[in-house]
């Protein structure tokens, strides 16, 4: 069964006023449109366009609760657990549109999420309390594929040697000023010399930088911002600046979050620019923040976020430090795996989800044409799915029914449809459980 779904974008302050509307061919609302949720998460369940197809249910979560065997299939209908009594769709598809930087954040492992959820329940902390860390018992790994020409992000800690080289460049800039203040940078450098330098530095910046006695950290933030802006100014005049992207980032963050310790933490984290079609995979513990751009995001159906700066919201420093992975690692690019001409899959190392990209255009030479000469693609589901058309239009046929899908439209797919055939031209993203095949 194909069931058309839709939703209203969430209007977080960092959202774009145009990106989602332009992608989906809609009129902008005039408010920031940050995230379009297409799933069954209780925070913003997708609306069912024709409730008569879903036994009268108006939202996807209500239909799944009422008819789990039909909506999810027998494998996932019996998958309730982790502290919940109802079957659940294990993934959540989103469109994310950032006009301003999001908070620095990380997500817990499955074990940490279950333990934290139970502890906060036992403590009587309401699920909607602003100081609650765990709103459900699930982990939240996620991947994002860039839909804009560039999607800017921070993710994963840099190697300490690289961080020291960045600080050396700042020291040189400081020494060239009329009023050198080397002790400001020295306060950070002293935290980067121990056995666990990144943890020590983040602990100090967050713990001391957000209280009333934040003088030393506040001084450091102010000095880093001043020096970074000088570096950008010199680069604009033709000077060579080795770590220019890091200094540009400092200026951008300072414009939106003046005085926030996350400004300095950004120097410890990789800056990444994704081109359209490139993806990142962010497993448990990976510190990250999206800065600007449009992307399609797929994650487990969870809302567990441990924040670490660039936000006025609650930060639990102790919990964050235990969740963060401080191991310096390469940028976690996630290359797509070709399945067949025009069909590729982003396949992370978790069983909760995969993201298939179907691309078809009449002028390609690798098309598998139908009798009518229309390009065709095939994908076989292993569980339920959600498809979103980002360009063009398609006729999608499954084992039991068919549906029309054009730019801006989305549909939920029950697993009994099995093999899907996409006839048409454009681009579709298909979120589903592991493992699909072509």
Image: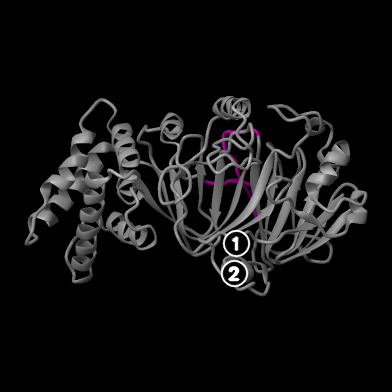
The residue carrying pointer 2 sits among few (fewer than 14), some (14 to 19) or many (20 or more) residues within 10 Å by Cα, namely: some
Picture coordinates of residue 269 (x, y %)?
35, 45
Point out which mark residue 82 bears.
Answer: none
Query: Badge 1 is on which residue?
Result: 11
Which residue is located at x 19 percent, y 63 percent?
230
Asked whether disc 2 touches disc 1, contact meaning CB atoms under 8 Å apart, the reply is: yes
Picture coordinates of residue 298 (x, y %)?
61, 47
Mark 2 / mark 1, whichever is N-terminal: 1
Which residue is located at x 23 percent, y 38 percent?
161
Residue 137 is at least partly visible in this image: yes
Q: Is residue 51 magenta?
A: no
**Would you say 126 lies left or right of 376 here?**
left
Which residue is located at x 25 percent, y 43 percent?
163
**Would you say 122 lies left or right of 59 here?**
left
On the image, which quarter does residue 122 sit in?
top right
Considering the numbered disc 1 on the image, is that residue within a helix, a strand or a loop?
A: loop
Q: Is residue 340 magenta?
A: yes
Stretch of the chain drawn in magenta:
335-351
Considering the numbered disc 2 on the image, is that residue within a helix, a strand or a loop?
A: loop
**Would you say 423 lies left or right of 173 here?**
right
Q: Is 434 placed above or below 409 here?
A: above
Classify the position of the C terminus by image quarter: top right
Q: CA–CA distance between discs 2 and 1?
A: 6 Å
Query: Badge 2 is on which residue?
Result: 31
Picture coordinates of residue 187 (x, y %)?
18, 41
Which of these two is toward me, 187 or 423?
Answer: 187
Which residue is located at x 19 percent, y 39 percent?
189
Which of these two is toward me, 349 or 62?
Answer: 62
On the image, which quarter does residue 339 sit in?
top right
Picture coordinates of residue 349 (x, y %)?
57, 34
Residue 340 is at least partly visible in this image: no
């Amino acid at each position: 069964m194909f069931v058309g779904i839709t939703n209203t974008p969430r209007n977080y302050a960092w959202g774009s006023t145009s990106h989602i509307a332009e992608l989906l061919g809609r009129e902008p609302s005039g408010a920031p449109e940050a995230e379009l949720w297409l799933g069954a998460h209780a925070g913003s369940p997708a609306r069912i366009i024709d409730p008569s197809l879903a036994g009268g249910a108006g939202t996807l979560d209500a239909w799944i609760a009422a008819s789990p065997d039909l909506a999810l299939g027998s494998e996932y209908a019996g998958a309730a657990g982790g502290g919940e009594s109802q079957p659940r769709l294990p993934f959540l598809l989103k469109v994310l549109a950032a006009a301003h930087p999001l908070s620095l954040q990380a997500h817990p492992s499955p074990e940490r999420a279950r333990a934290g959820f139970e502890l906060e329940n036992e403590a009587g902390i309401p699920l909607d309390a602003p100081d609650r860390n765990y709103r459900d018992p699930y982990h939240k790994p996620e991947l994002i594929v860039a839909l804009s020409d560039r999607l800017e992000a921070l993710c994963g800690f840099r190697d300490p040697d690289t961080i020291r080289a960045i600080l050396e460049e700042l020291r040189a800039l400081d020494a060239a000023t009329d009023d050198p203040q080397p002790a400001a940078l020295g306060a950070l450098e002293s935290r980067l010399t121990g056995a666990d330098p990144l943890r020590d530095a983040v602990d100090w910046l967050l713990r001391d930088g957000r209280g009333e006695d934040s003088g030393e950290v506040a001084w450091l933030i102010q000095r880093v911002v001043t020096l970074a802006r000088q570096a950008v100014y010199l680069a604009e005049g033709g000077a060579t600046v080795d770590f220019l992207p890091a200094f540009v980032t400092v200026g951008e963050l300072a414009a939106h979050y003046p005085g926030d310790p996350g400004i300095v933490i950004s120097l410890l984290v990789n800056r990444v620019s994704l081109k359209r079609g490139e993806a990142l995979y962010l497993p448990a513990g990976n510190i990250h923040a999206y800065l600007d751009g449009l992307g399609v995001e797929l994650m487990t159906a969870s809302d567990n976020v441990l924040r670490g700066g660039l936000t006025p919201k609650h930060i639990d420093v102790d919990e964050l430090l235990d969740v963060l992975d401080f191991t310096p690692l390469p940028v976690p690019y996630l290359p797509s795996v070709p399945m067949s001409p025009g069909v590729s899959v982003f396949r992370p190392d978790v069983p909760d989800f995969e993201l298939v990209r179907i691309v078809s255009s009449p002028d390609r030479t690798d098309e598998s044409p139908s009798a009518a000469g229309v390009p065709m693609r095939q994908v076989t589901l292993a569980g339920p799915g959600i498809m979103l058309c980002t360009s063009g239009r398609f006729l999608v046929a499954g084992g039991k029914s068919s549906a029309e899908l054009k730019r801006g439209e989305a549909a939920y797919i029950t697993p009994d449809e099995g093999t899907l055939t996409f006839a048409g031209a454009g681009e579709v993203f298909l979120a589903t459980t592991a493992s699909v095949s072509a």
